[in-house]
Amino acid sequence: MKQNIQKRLAAQILKCSTKRVKLDKERLEDIKKAITKANVKSLIKEKAIKRKPVKGISKSRVRKNKAQKRKGRQRGYGSRKGTKNIRLGKKRRWVNLVRAQRKLLKDIKERGLISKQSYRGLYLRVNSGFFRNRRHIKLYIGEQNLLEKKK
């Protein structure tokens, strides 16, 4: 038989939902007789009526996923939500591009393949966004005959 009234009274006393009220199966007869709040309170003291603990949400899966993401996993197309520009901002992309191009120019200059004047001109072109990538710089140097002959 259901003890809805007793459960409701116990829930009010325990300050929780009726779903979290647990009744002792051996003491069901005593619980059925309890019709006042005072009776229910005494049963709670006698541990015939208990409150179930709150269920928490486990973070183990979240921790596992985070560890995988740190390793670079789960970054495929299915996991992406933002656009390419949001995931790696325009400015950041520009900085990476310019740094790579300047590094290439510096390397070419240090090896003595281009003169200081042509280096300066190329450097300014990099700064203005003339070149698409490093390969474009190499093509341009070849087309304009900027390579110096080694002595």
Image: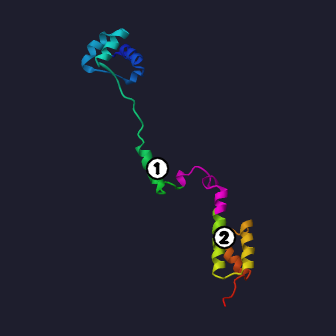
User: Measured from the top left, where is residue 30 in percent x and y?
Assistant: 27, 12
Which type of secondary structure does the marked residue at label 2 adopt? helix
Left or right relative to 124: residue 52: left
Residue 132 appears in view? yes
Which type of secondary structure does the marked residue at label 1 adopt? helix
Q: Nearer the viewer, mark 2 or mark 1?
A: 2
Is 78 covered by the magenta stretch?
Answer: yes
The quarter of the image holding the C terminus is: bottom right
Residue drawn 70% across and 79% down?
A: 141
Q: What label does residue 66 carry, if any?
A: 1
Left or right relative to 106: residue 27: left
The quarter of the image holding the N terminus is: top left
Chain part drawn in magenta: 77-95
Report the number of discs.
Answer: 2
What amino acid type is highlighted by mark number 2? Arg
Residue drawn 66% across and 74% down?
A: 105
* Disc 2: which residue: 102
Q: Residues within 10 Å of mark 2 (few under 14, many from 20)?
A: some
